[in-house]
Amino acid sequence: MKKIAIAGTGYVGLVTGVCLADIGHDVICVDRDQHKVSTLNNGYPPIYEPGLNELMLKNMEEGRLRFTTSPSVGFEDAEVIMITIGTPQNEHGTLDLQYIEQISKEIGRSLKRNNVIIVTKSTVPVGTNAKVKSWIQSEIQTSLKFQVVANPEFISQGSAIYDTFHGDRIIIGSDSKEALNLLEELYQPFGIPIFKTDMNSAELIKVASNSFLALKISYVNALASICEQMGANIEDVSFGMGMDSRIGSAFLKAGLGFGGSCLPKDTHALVQMGNDAGEAFNLIKEVIEVNKRQELKLVEKALNRFHSLHGKKVALLGLSFKPNTDDIREAVSIKLARHLVHEGATVIAYDPVSIPNAKKVLGELISYAETVEQALMNADLTFIVTEWDEIKNVPLNLFHELMKDPVIFDGRNCFQLESIKKFPVEYYSIGRPNVIGETISVRR
Ligand code: UDX
């Protein structure tokens, strides 16, 4: 059992803290946001993540998990300090390290023990851990020794707890063998393969992995556009490709592209790292470009179908960047909503959990529905943006029963073409043939 302090209670910090407490460590999470810390101390996580609230409460009750705003209370006694502070992207596409620098210096000022291990879990450019080391060193008044380990995080939103206990690998990188061995011991109870390497390689593995996932998504989305022109079906093409174990079936789902807090940021970061290294990474630049084009696919299809969206009522289903999270960072829904309004449409959106977050960004630009049915009522078009189970399982008869004109633009290929054919709807999806229901083709 180790005494662990987590610096930053964002999504990575909170999930990591809760899971490390659950395998028996004594965890204290430090965050300067007073409101967040009091909410957490009252037993409420500030984010929606399946299973998080229950696990958090259990570990708080069992006395292994605490929250504080005080860096000295948090860091003074810790044997291991994990940095899980955000690294937002600045306007030039580089990762902003000012918060990492601040917290590193704060840690340096608070250190009281010898041989504390500082672990960076935040996604950072190559070379940052070396900077973390010097930022901490610059604030240490005594001759205390400490070690720094790069330990990038691979959990996905919506399945973060599951991923922490069942991930494919844990990557740790440091120039200190002792530090690597101690971390290996700390993580052992998860039973996940641990790969030990140097600091720079560990840092690069994270950005390279996320960019590779983005590459798979853009690859399949670019193929989807070819399928549309050639009369092929991207779902079958992806499935057939994924049967080759060298390719793998994961991340070959065509749709409106990738969003969220990681893939968009990490692809830009890799391009930037390539530039810094004098090795332009044009392949990843194209991945970003394909993703940008993909965002507007549904609007293009709708404009092809209707010529103008002026005065049309659009039901927008799904706001979060992916299902099972309330995160709307880099969510295609936000861009689509703005675009639709710009085209003169009125938008009514439904999402099982993300409406409060969307309201903070979109405000009254659009209206919000409490149910799928309410969103569909008298709509001229439906845009499906996030493949929540609740949205994938909408009874197909609802579209023609509730909508004024049952025209569906599905950005996540939620429905089987064979099923949708049985209903009097027009259905346009990504990389698959359009479906014009029997009754509709007679009517028009
Ligand atoms: C990602 C990485 O997967 C994770 O390892 C890392 O720690 C954090 O970044 P996350 O951002 O939570 O996780 O979501 P992810 O499941 O990777 O999806 C990212 C985006 O890609 C979503 O917008 C999703 O809709 C899209 N996506 C994913 C596709 O369009 N097609 C796919 O086949 C898979």
Image (cartoon, rainbow, N blue to C red):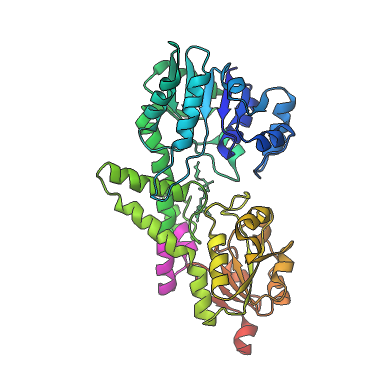
* Figure quadrant of residue 177: top left
Write the residue at 25% across / 45% down: 279
Report whether residue 140 is seen. Answer: yes
Q: Left of 390 or right of it: where is 338?
A: left
- Give the percent coordinates (x, y) of residue 123: 45, 38
Image quadrant holding the N terminus, namely top right
Report whether residue 246 is seen. Answer: no
Write the residue at 43% across / 37% down: 97
Query: In front here: 4 or 252?
Result: 4
Q: In this view, does 292 lie above or below 299?
A: above
Question: Chief secondary structure of the magenta span?
Answer: helix
* Figure quadrant of residue 368: bottom right
Number of on-image labels: 0
Give the magenta range.
221-239
Image quadrant holding the C terminus, namely bottom right
Query: In front here: 372 or 106?
Result: 106
- Give the percent coordinates (x, y) of residue 121: 49, 32
Write the residue at 42% across / 42% down: 95
- Give the percent coordinates (x, y) of residue 288: 40, 56
Q: Left of 90 or right of it: where is 403?
A: right
Q: Left of 299 or right of it: where is 222?
A: left
